[in-house]
Image: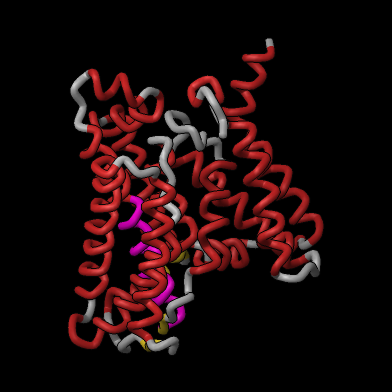
Amino acid sequence: MKDTLFKLLRQHGSLMVLLIIMIAVSTAAPGILRWRAINSLLMDNAPLLILIIGATMPILLGCLDLSIAGMASLAAVTAAILSPSLGSASAIVVVAGGALIGGLQGYLIGRLQVPSFVISLGALGIFKGLAMFMTGANMVGLAPGISLYEWLGGRSFGISNSFILTLTVAGILTWVLKFTNLGRNIYAFGANEIAVYISGVRRDLVRSLAFATSAGCAALGGVMMVSQTMFASATVANSLLLPALVGVVVGGTAISGGVGGVVSSLIGGLIAILIRVGVTISGLPPESQDVAFGIVILIAVALTTDRAKIGIVK
């Protein structure tokens, strides 16, 4: 009975939490449920959602990518700097470059046998430092009239193009996880890495592809941010790391790996967005968001961690 209840909570708990928070927020601010307000929220938070989608992949392995906010800031800065000379191609170059760097991180984790949070934390510092160096701590403007950035900052059929792209990426990654060998290997890796190694799966390749996806999505998030504001700074995405991790784990993706998915993380992302809205409409200072996210992530990790698989927690 206890196991059945826990399984139901893991499968549908995030939907219940989303519904409860939505009711609470809409009661305090009824206008939040109007289509115009919802559409604006989805457009403004598309970069956060794409970071959440990407961060899901390493967490399914039982790893952590703490560099996603730094990668998003670096990507935004680089896209703005390259936009006068490369135009729309600057966005493609930045996303591809981000994915390559992420793949390298994943490879180094396996080859050096260093925990993922250490490698990605070091990468976070490198990315933030590079972004600061490239901008001189100043804002960098995006070249006007570039079609791809204008499309990302615009709407189609009344819906934000950035959000449409986010859903497209989510759909592709969901298909990869459900119907490809790579997806099955990612879940198997998260459930039992030793068994995956014994079965002959190339762990370094699986890990590299997961981290490449995470970094590529983070870079795409940075491109979305610069398309919305038309400028970039070295700190433009600094506030997104904690809510991105909250979105993944609150959605039901276990921090220990092997359980969850992209759709679950999207639901968790909506919860993170509503928490931000709830803090704002309640009149609390912006710093309260981090307090709320910190409490939520502690509870979510405590509930979703598979302690039997970890063995000793330290």
Residue 222: in magenta span: yes
Q: Quadrant of residue 14?
A: top right
Q: Nearer the viewer, residue 191 or 161?
A: 191
Position of the C terminus, as image quadrant, is top right
Residue 9: in magenta span: no
Q: From this viewpoint, which residue is outermost toward the top?
A: 1
x and y, in percent, of residue 235 in the image: 48, 75
87 relative to 24, above or below: below
Side of 262 where 242 appears, left or right: right
Side of 72 where 205 appears, left or right: left
Visual colour scheme: secondary structure
Residue that appears at 33% across and 83% down: 134
Residue that appears at 27% across and 40% down: 110
Visible residue check, residue 136:
yes
x and y, in percent, of residue 234 in the image: 43, 78
x and y, in percent, of residue 99 in the image: 26, 57
Q: What main secondary structure does the magenta stretch of the protein show?
A: helix
56 relative to 131, above or below: above
Q: Nearer the viewer, residue 12 or 307?
A: 307
**Residue stretch in magenta:** 214-230
Q: Quadrant of residue 59?
A: top left
Visible residue check, residue 154:
no
- Image label count: 0
Residue that appears at 22% across and 81% down: 87
x and y, in percent, of residue 274 in the image: 65, 56
Side of 240 where 180 appears, left or right: left
Position of the N terminus, as image quadrant, is top right
Residue that appears at 32% across and 48% down: 211
